[in-house]
Amino acid sequence: MPDQETSDESDDPATGGGEQKPPARVRPAVAERPRHRMNLFAIFGLGSGQWGWAIGAKATIAMALAFSLGSYVFTPQLATLAALGSMTVLYERNTPYGYRAIALGFVGLGFVASVMVGSLSALNPWASAVAVGAIAGVATWLCQALRVDRPGPLFFVLVGAIATIIPGGFTEVPLHTAIAAVGAAVGWVVSMSGALIRGRHPENQAVAQAFVQLAALLRAIGTRRLDHVQHDASVAVAEAWRIMLLAQARGYRDTPEVARLRALLRWVSDIHLTATDVSMARTSPLPEEAARFADELAVAVARPERAPDPDALDALRKGLRPRSWEPQLYNRLARAAQAARRPEHENTDRGLELYDTRFPSVGNSLRSSLSRDSLIRPTALRMGITVALAGVVGLALGMDRFYWISITATTVLQGGNVVLTVNRSAQRALGTLLGVAIGAGALFLDPALVTVIVVASLFQGLGQFALTRNFFYGTVLITPMALLLAHTAAPYPVDALAQARILDTILGSIAGMLGAVLLWPRASAARLPPTISDVLDRARLAITAVLDPDVRLSPERRYRMRRDLRAALVSLRGVYDSAIGDVPRATTTRPLWPVVVATQRTGYLALAALTLEHPPAASHITVQRLDLAFKELQEALLHRRTPRLGALPRLVDYPRINMELRALSSSMRTAVAEDTRTAELQEKRRAQREKRHAQQEIDADL
């Protein structure tokens, strides 16, 4: 994602003359390979992050208002559609309000379309099962292609599924869609209400989070966590630039207020890459004062008066060579503090230009999501086919309320890979068991409509509050809400409803796991080598452009190269994390972790080189040899062979790039050797099986 140009004054150690940096001789240790585990902590443990206080309160208010309004104007049965429509409040919770107003409108239209499809298919249960599957597949495709964040396709499926059981025929479809639209409008109003109090909170929060992750990166230097925290920091910077671009509405983008935010984000982006150079040359932790300074900058994003004193870092600079990377890191932190102290910023300063559109073309996003190299296409097809077949099988088994199977399968498949899907299945099954007990207990009391509205709204809010930390606890709280809405929409004996709900959940969990294992199980693993190659290609273009004495990078080209390379780096870790969880077929993916780390580090070093205002150039022959080395690594990776790299050209001013390219070549040789050993072992086992089978046939003849 986008990050901006460097500041007017050059802080680069490579600028001009000055003292040269000695080449780093010690490579930082490779972080432990990420592991998706199937254990009790994965099911019951709390994840990182904060509780969803704000979204929980908004979800409660939106459902209470929509449910009450629908019950007053229409009937309690139809009011459930309004309650479901109010779940628009759960989407686009972190985007700027100007963009959110438009995006939530389209989410509301999606809910209305789901209700329409569900209502039209309600006359035939088999058609309903297929329709719910179609909603799941299309919603997954659109949400991922257009970067609609959590909760993704789940509530589109829930809305469409509940619409299939509400009484009425074709003549009632316009009424059903209108009621859902009213509920969506209520959710829109509640979500947008924050604009009246903290109109620029999303932008401030995104930039502040980038500084928080920068502080975490500074603390991780010299530790085994470096590669993981580096990725988290890059994701935070990329997300902050996405949020800032979405906020660039006409009349706001040229204000001193937004210029200050862009300046701070430019600084945190450049400091992040300066920290990359420091981390590659330092194997011991940085002083804690540097990380605390970054934490204080995070607070100062929204409160300039809380900005730290730039002179507080003077003690850290003492005794360091002025032209080395570490004092330059402290210099940039100090200059970021100076920018944070000003409540406004001149928009004419260099480096604050925007060379990007507010948001990417919808058509281009949809087309790229359907390409062969995209993971979105197999993910959406897997979701749609699994959910549809789960509903059809449920009907074939004589289950009237098949839609719970479809909803559960949708929830489980949102895990992303086999391991996470299994964990989600366990969380969903156990959470539903407890949630059904709570919901059935509430329904046995035969509550009045007012009580149903209040209790369902509270459970909805509490569920969203807990979901940010653990899916199991969120499921325990959301299940009673779903039961209350389903029972209100189509009354059913409570004991039978509870029993069916538990059985449907078990079947839906099994269906979700089968879909993850059987449908496109190697989608992520197959896309990992091309993704690594893409990062190397973008790093090659960036490094050769920086080194080429005949190339003068314009600010716009520099900006686009940084944006595209950072996006490719973020995508690389996402693809690897998905592929490593696709067991039992992840055996060929695990050996690639050192390759991924070396590629990631090479990419970040290329990004850091792009921040240099006047980088030292290299000779033409050096640039050509380096270009050939990158291409050989790409070819070897795509053909899964040992790279024939030869001697790398010596980069005196960029020794760490040489180091990572050698490490990349070495790790590729190791991965190829492990592939060979694995193939030989599999062939040996196959031969042993055939021998045993032949011996059994001989014994049987005797």
Image (tube, grey):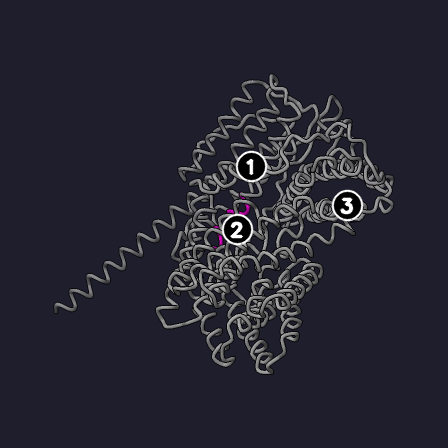
* Residue 575 counted in the magenta span: yes
Residue at 77% across / 47% down in the picture?
298
What's the amino acid at mark 3? Ala
Q: Amino acid at mark 1?
A: Ser
Residue at the disc numbered 2: 577
Does residue 540 sit above or below 63 in this rendering?
above
Question: Closest to the observer: 538 or 670?
Answer: 538
Quick one: SS at disc 2? helix
Q: CA distance from mark 2 to mark 1?
A: 28 Å
Nearer the viewer's eye, disc 1 or disc 3?
1
Residue 46 appears in the picture as rendered: no
Quarter residue 54 falls in: bottom right
Apparent side of residue 357 relative to residue 266 in the rendered image (left or right): left
Dominant secondary structure of the residues highlighted in magenta in the image: helix
Above/below status of 615 relative to 385: above
Work out whether residue 288 or residue 336 is closer to the camera in this orientation and state it: 336
Query: Range of the magenta residues?
Result: 572-581
- First in sequence, mark 1 or 3: give its number: 3
- Amino acid identity at mark 2: Asp
Look at mark 1 in the image and give the residue it sits on.
361
Q: Which residue is mark 3?
A: 294
